[in-house]
């Protein structure tokens, strides 16, 4: 399973401008690529919405060796309901802490050298106040589970992750495909996991020839498959194949063929410019205000 790697987490955003400020100016991430779409994704990348939407990939470096964020923006939706499913993304960067203080972005000190902040929409980010490493600063993504042992079995026995650390007292398990990747932390919350309408999706790459095997195993084990193996087209870019799963608590998991994804995810030097142009051209807020309406709250 060493050939499998963590790629990104998908966040739905209602305020694209404030969100861009957080990732670029507070965290210090780069816009890796930006794409606009006129209709919904057949793998529901943007959620259960059919209209115009955009996808912005942001991170500290190329997706080949960095875990990044995928920001999906649906033009008609201004707000999503947060559940208890996403517990946070942890990264190491004293510069991000300094940026937040300089910009008066709310910060709460959790313990020595650790701060909690929120992205627009209420998504939690934990900032370790230490020098940003030469490798990927993103250390882990934390998700809530209702039964830790059941979740560990799913992620290890079925998906091939190994348990790196386990704390029985805190009911937490740290898992990953390799030591030099962003880790997945599972925390038992002792109750049902609520995904709200802001529910995200975590993505991993694997060799293309493993995709059908993953789907077959899930069928055999009677696990949930949200989107059977399908090809996704991006105009002018590589066509990728994906299969979308759901773990025992309903967390969405995307596996994508690695070979084509490396082509698709090549950093676009115009990404920053394309995002700025799209935000400048987005008059949806003005339209709703003019007509004395509000964007939908999902």
Image: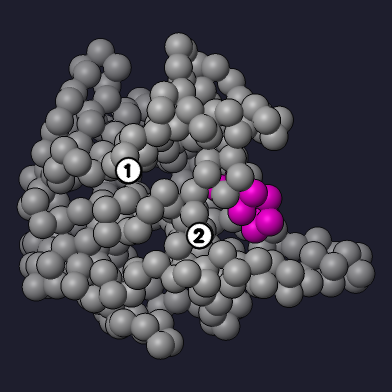
| Residue 54 vertical placement versus 1 (above, below) | below
| Residue 175 vertical placement versus 78 (above, below) | above
In the displayed structure image, the side of residue 295 where residue 101 appears, left or right: left
Q: Is residue 106 magenta?
A: no
In the displayed structure image, the side of residue 206 where residue 198 appears, left or right: right
The quadrant of the image that shows the C terminus is bottom right
Q: CA distance from mark 1 to mark 2?
A: 15 Å
Q: Position of residue 174 (x, y in %)?
A: 23, 31
Q: Residue at x 56, y 64 (%)?
A: 272
Bin the neighbour count of mark 2 within 10 Å (Cα to Cα): few under 14, some 14-19, many 20 and up. Answer: many
Instruction: Report helix, strand or loop for mark 1.
Output: loop
Q: Residue at x 29, y 34 (%)?
A: 185
Label located before the other in sequence (1 or 2):
2
In the displayed structure image, the side of residue 240 where residue 9 appears, left or right: right
Bin the neighbour count of mark 1 within 10 Å (Cα to Cα): few under 14, some 14-19, many 20 and up. Answer: many
Instruction: Report helix, strand or loop for mark 2.
Output: strand
Q: Position of residue 266 (x, y in %)?
A: 35, 70
Regarding residue 214, the answer to whether it shows in the image is yes
Q: Which residue lies under the disc numbered 2?
A: 31
Q: Nearer the viewer, residue 9 or 279?
A: 279
Q: Position of residue 6 (x, y in %)?
A: 26, 51
Q: Position of residue 81 (x, y in %)?
A: 60, 47
Mark drawn on residue 41: none
Regarding residue 245, the answer to whether it shows in the image is no
Residues drawn in magenta: 14-23
Q: Which residue lies under the disc numbered 1?
A: 136
Q: Residue at x 41, y 24 (%)?
A: 130
Colouring method of the image: one colour
């Amino acid at each position: 399973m060493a050939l499998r790697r963590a790629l990104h987490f998908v966040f739905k955003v209602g305020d694209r401008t404030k969100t861009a400020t957080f990732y670029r100016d507070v965290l210090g991430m780069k816009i890796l690529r930006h794409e606009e779409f006129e209709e919904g994704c057949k793998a529901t990348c943007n959620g259960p919405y059919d209209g115009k939407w955009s996808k912005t990939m942001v991170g500290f470096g190329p997706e080949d060796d960095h875990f990044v964020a995928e920001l999906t923006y649906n033009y008609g939706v201004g707000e999503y309901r947060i559940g208890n499913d996403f517990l946070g993304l942890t990264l190491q960067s004293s510069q991000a802490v300094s940026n937040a203080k300089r910009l008066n972005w709310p910060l709460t000190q959790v313990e020595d050298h650790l701060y909690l902040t929120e992205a627009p929409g209420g998504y939690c980010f934990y900032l370790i106040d230490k020098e940003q490493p030469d490798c990927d600063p993103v250390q882990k993504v934390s998700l809530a589970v209702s039964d830790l042992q059941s979740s560990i079995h799913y992620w290890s026995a079925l998906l091939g992750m190994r348990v790196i650390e386990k704390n029985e007292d805190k009911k937490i398990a740290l898992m990953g495909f390799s030591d030099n990747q962003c880790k997945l932390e599972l925390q038992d919350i002792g109750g049902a996991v609520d995904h709200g309408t802001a529910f995200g999706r975590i993505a991993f790459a694997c060799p293309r020839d493993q995709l059908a095997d993953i789907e077959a195993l899930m069928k055999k084990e009677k696990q949930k498959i949200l989107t059977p193996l399908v090809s996704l087209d991006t105009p002018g870019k590589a066509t990728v194949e994906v299969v979308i799963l759901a773990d025992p608590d309903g967390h969405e998991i995307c596996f994508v063929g690695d070979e084509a994804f490396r082509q698709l995810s090549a950093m676009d030097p115009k990404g920053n410019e394309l995002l700025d142009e799209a935000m400048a051209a987005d008059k949806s807020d003005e339209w709703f205000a003019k007509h004395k309406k509000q964007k939908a709250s999902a």
